[in-house]
Image: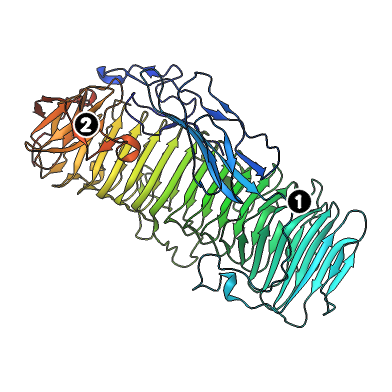
Amino acid sequence: MKQSIALLVTAALAVAGCVKGNSPFGLDGQGDMPGGAQSVSSLKDPSLSWSADSFEATIGAENSFPTLANPNGVDVTYSSSQSEVATIDASGAITLLSSGSTLISASCAATQTYSAASDSYLLTVLSASGSEADDNSLSFASTGDPTSEDDISTSTFVGKITISFSDSGNASVSGDSYGYVAVDGNKVTVNNTGGEALIYELRGTTSNGFFKVYGIKKQAIVLNGVSITNPDGAALNNQNKKRTFIVVKGSNTLSDGASASYTKEGSEDLKAVLFSESQVIFSGSGLLTVNALNAQGKAGISSDDYIRLMDSPTIKVNAGTGAGNGFKGKDYVQLSSGSLVVSIAADMAKGISTDDYVLVQGGTHMVTSTGGVAYDDEDAEYTGTSCVKADNYFAMTGGSLTLKNTGDGGKGIRAGSYDFDATNHTLSDSYISGGTLTVSTSGREVNDVSAKSIKIGWVTKNGTGDHATVTGNAGNLIISGGSINVSCANGEGLEVKGTLTFDGGETYVYSGGDDAINSQGDLLVNDGFIYSYATRNDALDANGDIKLNGGYVMAVCTAGGAEVGIDANTEGGKKLYINSGATIVAYGGLERGYSTTQDVYTMSVSAGSWNALHDGQKFIAAFNAPSGISSYIVSAPSLSSGYKGVSVSGEGKCSGAWATDGISGGSSVALSAYNGSSGGNFGGGPGGGGPGGRH
């Protein structure tokens, strides 16, 4: 998936921001701010773009790698996320080293003319052969978690049956001393009535066949250079309700047909091109491509239990405009390693979907959605698409997850559903403690279905409809680590229906149409680095209290009028608290009636460069001011003066917005007490800041 990101910042600022071509200041990248405020301009997007979102290359073969469009000739730096799989040199030449997947990226630093930007594609490297040699072993190496039964190395298998598909004749079978396999052309059915734990290895090619298996014990299905197309429905149909390991070797393809009817046999479910009644654990180091071409709303991969991705396979799912979800594990989806690449195009479809939770622990994963809003007859409401949909919660502890939704009413992450707990409607906390999360949405609101990058939880409306009623089980989000980059063209960037807590990590959120960061409950910042940028509404907003207890918060609101940089719900009796230990930089004003235990000032800055806060003995922190903004509201522990035009070594925190080390130089500037009507408060309009100083 391409992630070309134009940054709404200056030559020194490298904060990833809006989606390419989506300027927050109008089509020309600039505009007049309400209330007599300054005109804030953005730099030009250098328009870096790879010619493909993903690519498969074979070691030893002639490979025509994706090319990079660089129409403005900016200086580009290339990188490979997994250098043991492939490397890329300074000229862009790629060297393939081993099987696996790696993220190939091209990036440029900001200049006086162009913003910083980056674009990536997922490169999957395959061995020279379409299939791997058969070692006749009945055991497997560890897939990364030997303490779990999901690690295939902990399972004992007693036999192996090999099925070789062929369009030139019937599928052939070897190793079936049990008499379990029935063959009808290339339609292969296994009925393991004896209960042995067996390995089924699939090879060869068929354009009119399938593999179907029944059993009562755990099993392994090895995909070793196999290509199965079933014009009528599922290519791989697992009716065994015990743990199923799918080991991916070489290059493999499973497809249905555009006219596939998915006719049920008795009461059997037929929900996907690759369907399983049981939990599915993917492993291996090869490539599996699943193509859902049907017009019946059937998924690419679906399990009526859970799905886990381990080891280093690449699973690529392409679901067309008439198909359904891309990758669904009913109980949960756990991405421990490897690579999952999902593309969905149907209205209402979900990329990664589960009735419970999605957990990302490692690996490199991408989801792209282009579908729109449609009427859901079952739920009697209009529904949009989501790259990730979890009815309970979303969690991330490591790895890389890149989500891009271009459809109207589309969301990047949608976690938390009223229907999850039919009795109590209780949701577990969503959390992000590690990894790299990148989310971009560019659709519009349609039929009351909003387009948001991340939406956590649910609420009900009160009688007036002005505010949502927050309950204790509405759905909370805790961010304690990792790097988060969110861009939403027309809706809220990050919305949490319960309490939003920052305990660490680096979070950048941009919105061009609503609040950048919003909590329907309380919003707490205890630690971490935050940059919240909004051009049409509040930068940092809560319907409850906002308590800034620590960390580093930069909130920029260029909307003017009643919108402010940091906004608590004073109309509902709530308040903004700036407590000792927090470092704050804001543009656009603060909510009236705020309470603070440390002084709040306005500071003149050098727009388009690094500026710093000083406590009289040392620098507290440096922040990178966007071009066109020359005055900010600031507050920090023991703050005594500001500095313009400082230098910072390294890239800084929060994608380059903040720095706490390597600060030097600059010229000292005096601070003025913030009085609620200056320092970027747009004339102190409604919703503006409260009186300056301590309260």
Horizontally, residue 592 falls left or right of residue 25, namely left
Is residue 272 in view? Answer: no
Q: Quadrant of the C terminus?
A: top left
Identified by mark 2, the residue type is Gly
What number is the disc on residue 688? 2
Dot 2, how many residues are within 10 Å of its Cα: few (below 14), some (14-19), or many (20+)?
many
Tell me where residue 558 sits by quadrant: top left
Q: Position of residue 114 (x, y in %)?
A: 41, 21
Element at badge 1?
A: strand
Element at badge 2?
A: loop
Disc on the earlier residue, 2 or 1: 1
Tell me where residue 642 sits by quadrant: top left
Is residue 269 in view? Answer: yes
Q: Position of residue 608 (x, y in %)?
A: 28, 23
Horizontally, residue 619 falls left or right of residue 126, namely left
37 over 322 or under it: above or below? above
Query: Between 429 and 84, which is closer to the camera in this rendering?
Result: 84
What residue appears at the point 84 percent right and 65 percent down from the top-left corner?
188
Identified by mark 1, the residue type is Ser
Q: Position of residue 310 (x, y in %)?
A: 56, 61
Using the numbered discs, state the Cα–Cα distance from disc 2 to disc 1 in whole angstroms.
57 Å
What residue appears at the point 44 percent right and 16 percent down from the top-left corner?
28
Query: Between 221 and 92, which is closer to the camera in this rendering?
Result: 92
Query: Between 242 and 445, which is closer to the camera in this rendering?
Result: 242
Q: Quadrant of the N terminus?
A: top right
Tell me where residue 306 sits by quadrant: bottom right
Query: Between 159 and 404, which is closer to the camera in this rendering?
Result: 159
Residue furthest bottom in the image: 194
